[in-house]
């Protein structure tokens, strides 16, 4: 374990609109990503619209940069390890770590399902119950960097759904709290669509006619899915720690919160 450079978190080359939610003394941190920003660049030239405006190494899953002369820690190479990802269209909490060994430890916690995530989603329609447990079997297909998930496979997916608020105007809308217990690609978007509760602005699994009407009425084209809070326990240097981070709902959700 290496010591963090002085003022490490104050010197991140944050992407457009990206903010720091929280960080602890061990080097665990959380960033709030706006909709439309990439978790990491997939090709050269995408750095300016990514989480950090820095070089990304896919094999090591880390960003790397060297502060320029006149900046804090000038000339000393810095790294930030990515612990999870969000689709570019989804906003909210992304976890990071400033130490490689720490990143390995926390990624293991993800694999063991020890991380609690809470999402908010604005959907078309009205759930039949205020609280439901969603269980589905999915198939995830990946081709040429694109992901498509559907119902009917062998991958188990579970999520808890509770209604935060319902709106009686046309179109019928509901603000949901979603807590996935499994982390499948596009899981929440597909599970909502399966129950005819399409997430507003979903251009892959959504209700395209209603999306067009919503854009005409509001002028807002974003996907209304937000990673609100992430929390977990982890062990480090023989001690147990608890980390939690919250990314407040974006302004677009304000009239629906």
Image: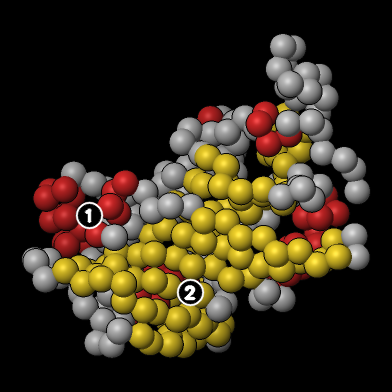
Q: Position of 164 compared to 118: left or right?
A: left
- Residue at 73% of width from left, 34% of height from top? 8
- Residue at 21% of width from left, 78% of height from top? 126
Residue 131's place in the image compared with 38, above or below, is: below
Residue 9's image quarter? top right
Q: Residue 55: percent from the left, percent from the top? A: 68, 33
The residue that disc 2 covers is: 179
Q: Which mark is residue 55?
A: none
Q: Could you say which is closer to the camera, residue 44 or residue 48?
A: 48
Residue 13's image quarter? top right
Residue 106's place in the image compared with 222, above or below, is: below
Q: Could you say which is closer to the camera, residue 237 or residue 89?
A: 237
Mark 2 burial class by Cα count in 10 Å: few <14, some 14-19, many 20+: many
Cα distance between the residues tagged 2 and 1? 22 Å
Task: State the residue lying farthest toward the top.
Answer: 70
Q: Is residue 193 visible?
A: no
Judged by depth in the image, the label closer to the viewer, 2 or 1, is: 1
Earlier sequence position, callout 2 versus callout 1: 2
Residue 64's place in the image compared with 109, above or below, is: above
Task: State the residue lying farthest toward the left.
Answer: 170
Q: Is residue 120 visible?
A: yes
Q: Position of 189 compared to 73: left or right?
A: left
Q: Could you say which is closer to the camera, residue 166 or residue 83?
A: 166
Q: Position of 103 compared to 165: left or right?
A: right
Q: Which mark is residue 255?
A: 1
The reply to whether discs 2 and 1 touch (Cβ–Cβ < 8 Å) is no
């Amino acid at each position: 374990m290496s010591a963090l450079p002085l003022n490490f978190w104050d010197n991140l080359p944050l992407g457009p609109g990206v903010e720091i939610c929280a960080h602890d003394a061990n080097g665990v941190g959380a960033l709030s990503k706006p909709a439309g920003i990439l978790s990491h660049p997939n090709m050269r030239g995408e750095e300016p619209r990514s989480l950090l405006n820095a070089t990304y190494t896919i094999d090591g899953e880390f960003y790397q940069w060297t502060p320029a002369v006149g900046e804090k820690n000038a000339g000393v190479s810095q790294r930030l390890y990515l612990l999870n990802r969000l689709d570019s269209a989804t906003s909210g909490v992304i976890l990071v770590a400033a130490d490689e060994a720490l990143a390995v430890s926390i990624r293991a916690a993800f694999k063991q399902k020890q991380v609690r995530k809470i999402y908010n989603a604005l959907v078309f329609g009205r759930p039949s119950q205020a609280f439901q447990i969603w269980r589905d079997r999915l198939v995830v297909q990946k081709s040429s960097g694109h992901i498509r998930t559907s119902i009917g496979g062998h991958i188990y997916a579970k999520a808890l759904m509770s209604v935060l608020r319902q709106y009686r105007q046309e179109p019928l809308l509901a603000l949901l709290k979603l807590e996935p217990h499994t982390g499948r690609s596009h899981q929440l978007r597909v599970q909502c669509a399966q129950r005819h509760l399409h997430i507003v602005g979903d251009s892959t699994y959504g209700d395209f006619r209603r999306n067009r009407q919503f854009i005409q009425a509001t002028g807002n084209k974003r996907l209304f899915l937000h990673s609100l809070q992430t929390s977990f326990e982890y062990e480090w240097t023989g001690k147990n720690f608890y980390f939690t981070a919250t990314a407040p709902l974006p302004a677009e959700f304000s009239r629906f919160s």
